[in-house]
Amino acid sequence: MVNENLVKDVVKEPYKYGFVTDIETEKIEKGLNEDIIKLISQKKEEPKFLLDFRLKAFKKWQKMKEPNWAALGYKKIDYQDIIYYSAPKQKEKISSLDEVDPKLLETFDKLGIPLTEQKKLTNVAVDAVFDSVSIATTFREELAKHGVIFCSISEAVKNHADLIEKYLGTVVPASDNYFAALNSAVFSDGSFVYIPKGVTCPMDLSSYFRINSGDSGQFERTLIIAEESSSVSYLEGCTAPMFDTNTLHAAVVELIALDDASIKYSTVQNWYAGDEEGIGGIFNFVTKRGKCLGKRSKISWSQVETGSAITWKYPSCLLLGEESIGEFYSVALTNNLQQADTGTKMIHIGPKTKSTIVSKGISAGNSKNSYRGLVKMGTKATGSRNYSQCDSMLIGDQASANTFPYIKSQQPNSEIEHEASTCRISEDQLFYLQSRGIEFEEAVSMMVSGFCRDVFNQLPMEFAAEADKLLALKLEGSVG
Amino acid sequence: MKESDPILEIENLSASTDNLPILKGVSLTVYPGEIHAIMGRNGCGKSTLSKIIAGHPSYNITNGDIKFLGENINSLEPEERSQSGIFLGFQYPIEIPGVSNLEFLRVSTNARRKFLNKEELDTFDFEELVKEKLEIVKMDHAFLSRSVNQGFSGGEKKRNEILQMALLEPKVAILDETDSGLDIDALRIVASGIKKISNAQTGIILITHYQRLLDEIKPNYVHVMSDGQIIKTGESDLALELEEKGYEWTDNFIKET
């Protein structure tokens, strides 16, 4: 018998980002109504078109119902019991990093994301978002030389209103779904990226999202536009303190790729997952979608999902341009009482479009891990192809894994291929590795990494190492 | 420890799985330089004996002791046994998808080296070492970049086992039906590999059904197992006699005892 307790110990690892930064914050009152939305818009000194966008979204949201089709069970969310705007108090206008509250810099230092000039990461430009606002963005001047715009979305609203007005909500319309509508009404901050024609972004761009308050939601909005023949690799990381209440995170990410452009979007999500009894943790309801508008454009999502109490997330691609390519590579690890319902949608609209889906779900403890994906071939998608591979790995005998593939084809001249498998880390495999001198924990970790290899290979180098370490951490036990 | 002291001593060992007794008092002592063969029908407990020596968690030792280099190892974890120099060559080597064979071999080798207070090898130094050892089993370098045993033929899996043995340089190796599923050429390669790795300081236990492996590697002792016990021990000619007369002949020993 594999020692069940040992397996349980191995998948238990204390959350090391659970600290709270003690900082004075400006919060508005709880609840959601038109006045609150006007207040948010006013605080952010937004143009009228954006306030209208928010109010329209709010009207739609009020008429919508919270979806319940996902294989998730959670306590009803009271949307009037949430604070929709929370920002650390600091001087009105910050012109340099020297004016950022040292406590905030310290916080990001602790998270491994140093922002100051001396310590900032080389080769990666970072936009650091704390609760509802962006704190700092590094390497801006450097990027500006190449014409790349990388700033908080609030700044973009002020300085590049034309681009925002042109593209915001064109990939994920406010009426898309319940959580997207909510986000459209109340989104606070997030990142904005614009890569001009023919430019290969000289460094990776990265946003780091930190939730600090226990009672406010985080609603960030990210918009990335890649003009003709440009390319960019974007990384996203997230953590939150440990609270015994649930915090709502409802983000929207929109990507737009024009002719021959390519966007690679990688996420390592490590929100607080709640404790062993399932108390606390982030409710993560996210709408991420990319539009391959141009010919031969390419959008690639890769994600490593290890945190959150609830994950509801389906990064998708709309393949409009001829010969455009969509990719989705995902590792989702759930433990204890975590629940994840995640997957992708590949909507083939243009001819000769191609998509690849590789999903790896790992469930340990009493957790529940579902893959849900849609592959659709439209009437014009002649000669299009999809390949999907969905593998689940179970650790212990209490965890569950589901695969829900939806396939719709209106085009006989297209190919859809779906493979799925479920495996358990077997006693024989563990014994084999152990009988070669490899410790139990390392054996489990080796097999999990092996299982995820296809996805890790897709991550940018620094991220792959981090992801491997993160999984190993989550799987490393309190033993020894 | 003196050089003439036994490497492995199994004393009156009984073991069960799910309360079902499998071994019923097995005793066996292996001295340095010795080769022992264990033969017997399917289900007689040969494979179980090998797994218990390696520390498989599915079996409980109900009585008796296993001593390795004079120390009782009944309660050691499988990895501790491997690190200290016990090697089990699997009858059915396990496939581990996604884990590169090279990395597996390196981690495994370093675990043993660490125990021996030898320097652990980085990827480059290990490549050198493994290249040398591949020669012994005439394996192609391409096997290293594949997942552990995945998609290997029966013969390739067995050669991979002997490659592991060559890297780990164990004090005692128990080879469970390493000859099964091998054609004659592969059998010769595996047998000559085993001979190259073993020396006057190591002990070998060959578990087999067939004489043909024993033609290549001549054992000092042959033990016949039946129903969880060793019912007869002889020298290498016992295997020939067994080949000639079949296991039915050994049934008489049970009646006698």
Image: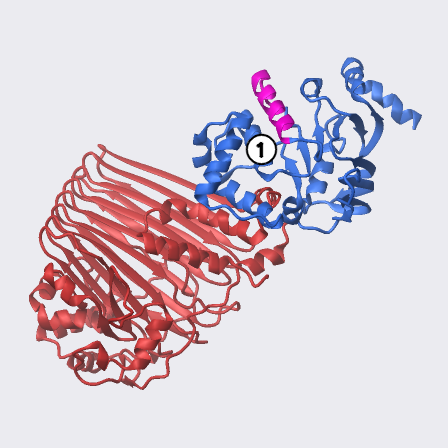
Chain colours: A red, B blue
Which residue matches tag 1? B161
Is residue A109 something one can see in this rendering? yes
Specify the farthest residue to the left: A162
Residue B227, by quadrant, is top right
Residue B104 locus on image (x, y percent): 51, 42
Q: Does residue A455 lie above or below B34 as drawn?
A: below
Residue under the image location 18 percent in, 52 percent down: A291
Label 1: how many Cα within 10 Å (few below 14, some 14–19, many 20+)? many
Residue under the image location 60 percent in, 26 percent down: B193
| Of B4 and A23, the residue lying toward us | B4
Chain letter behind tag 1:
B
Residue B113 locus on image (x, y percent): 58, 46
Q: Is residue B243 left or right of residue A111?
A: right
Give the main secondary structure of the magenta stretch. helix
Q: Does residue B247 lie above or below A257 as drawn?
A: above
Q: Which residues are magenta?
A: B181-197
Residue under the image location 34 percent in, 80 percent down: A81
Residue B245, by quadrant, is top right
Residue under the image location 34 percent in, 56 percent down: A463
Image quadrant occupied by the N terminus of chain B = top right
Q: Is residue B61 magenta?
A: no
Residue A157 locus on image (x, y percent): 12, 71
Q: Is residue B231 left or right of residue A7?
A: right
Residue A220 locus on image (x, y percent): 25, 69
Q: Is residue A223 left or right of residue B210?
A: left
Specify the farthest residue to the top: B244
Image quadrant occupied by the C terminus of chain B = top right
Is residue A168 something one can see in this rendering? no
Q: What amino acid is at disc 1? A: Glu
| Of B192 and A168, the residue lying toward us | B192
